[in-house]
Amino acid sequence: MVSYWRQYPDIEVKLQAVREFIEQRVQISNTDIESAIIAMNAAGGKYLRPAFFFMFTGFTEHKQYSDDERIAVAASLEILHMATLIHDDIIDDSPLRRGQVSIQSHYGKDVAVYTGDFLFTVFFELVIETMQGSPYLAVNAQAMKRILLGELDQMYLRFNQAQTVDNYLQSCTGKTAELFRLACEEGAYFGGADTATVERAGRIGINIGLAFQILDDILDYTAQEGEVQKPVLEDLATGVYTLPLLAAYEGHTQDFKPYLDKGLNISHEDIRTVARMVRDFQGVDKARELAQSFTQRALDDIEQLPHTPARKNLMKLTRQLLHRTR
């Protein structure tokens, strides 16, 4: 778990409880799968979605849901996130995840598929246990569908040089921002906030999620191998054209085309050349501007929330994410 949660001691304690809860819930007779999940859970994930959930529970003293129930809901968010990461790594044949050998690389794709599937079943169990009688049983089902559709949008657009920034944002809204929306909205709801606050929380989550994904894609073009906990420029190699490339590509099509036309045959040297052109043609700068815009939208909405310690922490964390380096 990343060190900056030490700045938020109340949140850090709750996230540790979530981590321990997950380890208890993923016990299974298949030792490979259990070991794979526990190792991934302990490998330094940011736990951002549970963190935002808990921050949004801090806007009311209402206690309709117990602390144990809230920990279970927060755990369901992280478990869903982990399941999607495992399946992403299978599709991308990614060797690393969270700075360690990925599950599919270490145990094989068969174990990885079953591990992701098992986590989905644990997610379903937690949702049923905690959300019976609430509208969030259906909301979670809808969120899963949007996440899948976002991933399908991205897969459909692989190696497509005609895709637009709008295509990219549509995919990101599903595959990344949807889970942030769910975390923030559920935090407000299970914290007992009023309807207006719950709706505002959802908007904040979408904008934070979009900014987060854009920054993640920027790091792919700016970070050195080892600074981030996954391979750099993996998306480009697999035909996933993210915002920095799309922003630089506009107006410089002929510069990029000879390299992108190679598809899967693009070489490591070609990839480094494309990355350099992305930076030279201000693709990174333009992407950062859009990330700042989404962050500001989130901050504007956060300012409208009740003046509580939770609001202060939300402002601080949202700004921190815009300047993260991994």
Image (tube, rainbow, N blue to C red):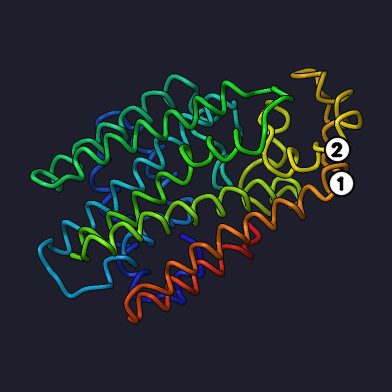
Q: Which residue is mark 2?
A: 251
Q: Quadrant of residue 118?
A: top left
x and y, in percent, of residue 231 in the image: 67, 40
Mark 2: secondary structure: loop
Q: Quadrant of residue 193?
A: bottom left
Left or right of 238 on screen, residue 2: left
Residue drawn at 57 percent across, 54 percent down? 211
Q: Which residue is mark 1?
A: 281
| Category of crowding for the residue at label 1, using alpha-carbon neighbours closer than 10 angstroms: few (below 14), some (14–19), many (at least 20) | some
Q: How many marks?
A: 2
Residue drawn at 53 percent across, 31 percent down? 89
The kind of residue on which mark 2 rests is: Gly
Residue drawn at 78 percent across, 47 percent down? 283
Residue drawn at 49 percent across, 68 percent down? 299
Left or right of 70 on screen, residue 91: right
x and y, in percent, of residue 317 in the image: 49, 69
Give the Cα separation between the discs numbered 2 and 1: 9 Å
x and y, in percent, of residue 105 in the image: 55, 29
Q: Is residue 245 above or below residue 73?
A: above
Mark 2 in CB contact with mark 1 (< 8 angstroms): yes
The kind of residue on which mark 1 rests is: Phe
Pointer 2 or 1: first along the chain: 2
